[in-house]
Image (cartoon, helix red, strand yellow):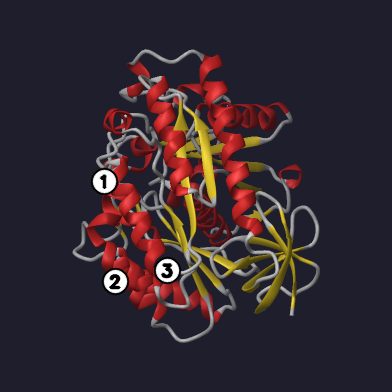
Amino acid sequence: MARVYVESYGCTRNRADGEIMEAILLRAGYELAESPEKADYVVVNTCAVKDPTEHKMVRRIRELLDSGKKVIATGCLIHVNPGVIDSRVSGMLGVKSIDRIAEAIEVAERGGKLVSVEGWRERNLDKLELPRLWKSGVVFVVPIGEGCLNACTYCATRFARGVLKSYKPELVVRWVKEALARGYKEIQLSSEDTGCYGFDIGTNLAKLLDEITAIEGVFRVRVGMMNPNHVIKILDELIEAYQSEKVYKFLHLPVQSGDNEVLRRMGRNYTVEEFEEIVKEFRRKISGLNLNTDIIVGFPGESGEAFENTVELVKRIRPDKINVSRYSPRPGTIASKWKQLPGWLVKERSRLLHRLRLQIAYEINQSYVGKKVEVLVHGEGKKGGIEGRTFNYKEIILDSGRAGQLGEAIVEGVGSTYLKGRLL
């Protein structure tokens, strides 16, 4: 049997899809290779959220093919811009066809090429009913749904993931219990937009969190990105659910712009004032909240005044972390047809915001020095030391600690993106 390596890019949701494919391949009798070099087939599970990401995916697929590897391309890029994918690939599977990964390799082995993209909207695939590969570690990602209820004028991901399909709460809870029984200590709830979870099946994120935190055991839950227009509908209930010690005091709430006219053009369906109201209420009731947000710079029609409004919002809100993206037009989106801002201007605004975000983040992190914080140890860090996460999901670099250990640490130093400390 062929040896296969699965390489996933992008969000935690996509990484979970990768683990599903690995489990399906193992069940079908294929061997999972330790590296691409040792594989006969490499599955490239793509992301398509930004233009630079697309270029990276295209380049990676070409590199693998040029090195003699057979490649199966899967993921969002298959839906968003299939024309850019090298025609030499041995198969192409959309996001709702990943259950056919073993079949794709079987077809390729016979000299054929399985392309399963069309008709994906009609496929009612519940991925929590598919197997997952259990890897050693502290963190386990549980997808709680696929798709979203938004229609942002710049987003191509919705062409891949479609309209919201929330997974049944009982299935989510079952996976969480199984993960905890296997020794995982951190559950990451993932979706394109966790904020609208359950709106299609008569429930919501707050109710799901209550069910999960009622499970016995010592563990932590990290809630993935949620959009303001959905959060505001369940705000009080959600904040109440966040009171549980099992939920990280971490809020990823993308604002995208500090200007209401730009938000309207983006199709975001909330105002700057509503975003600020959510932040204010969370901070009022959740001590030590770690606020993360996303901002797109250089969106078509963003005037100098609109950008200044964004800068002023950042100064008022002072998020712990901002993911700053330079706008890039994506195929098939409404915004890609509008007049684009000059590249030099977008870069200039991006650099200004980047400097400001690092300054604010550093100042906030400085306030932690000398304080004791609860820490869940993740394990060896990518850049040395031991990595952990604090009670509010800030990264902390420790001098010692074992993976899965929950303890108290004192913060002794900081950077703009991390804390440094030692376990007590």
Q: What residue did someone put label 2 on? A: 207
Residue 44 position within the rendered picture, expressed as x and y whole percent measured from the top left: 58, 40
Residue 250 position within the rendered picture, expressed as x and y whole percent measured from the top left: 48, 61
Q: Residue at x 61, y 30 (%)?
A: 56
- Which secondary structure lies at badge 3? loop
Sequence-first disc among 1 and 3: 1
Cα distance in 3D space between marks 1 and 3: 27 Å
Question: Would you place residue 409 above or below residue 192 in this image?
Answer: below
Q: Is residue 110 visible?
A: yes
In the picture, measured across the screen, residue 211 lies left or right of residue 393, that is left
Residue 146 position within the rendered picture, expressed as x and y whole percent measured from the top left: 35, 51
The answer to which of 59 and 196 lies nearer the viewer is: 196
Callout 2 crowding tier (Cα within 10 Å): few <14, some 14–19, many ≥20: some
Q: Quadrant of the C terminus?
A: bottom right
- As drawn, the label of residue 286 is 3
Sequence-first disc among 1 and 2: 1
- Which secondary structure lies at badge 2? helix
Cα distance in 3D space between marks 1 and 2: 19 Å
Q: What residue did someone put label 1 on? A: 149
Mark 1–mark 2 CB contact (< 8 Å): no
- Which secondary structure lies at badge 1? loop
Residue positioned most to the left: 202
- As drawn, the label of residue 268 is none
The answer to which of 118 and 348 lies nearer the viewer is: 348
Corner quadrant of residue 406: bottom right
Cα distance in 3D space between marks 2 and 3: 18 Å
Residue type at mark 2 is Lys
Residue 118 position within the rendered picture, expressed as x and y whole percent measured from the top left: 33, 34
Sequence-first disc among 2 and 3: 2
The answer to which of 367 and 224 lies nearer the viewer is: 367
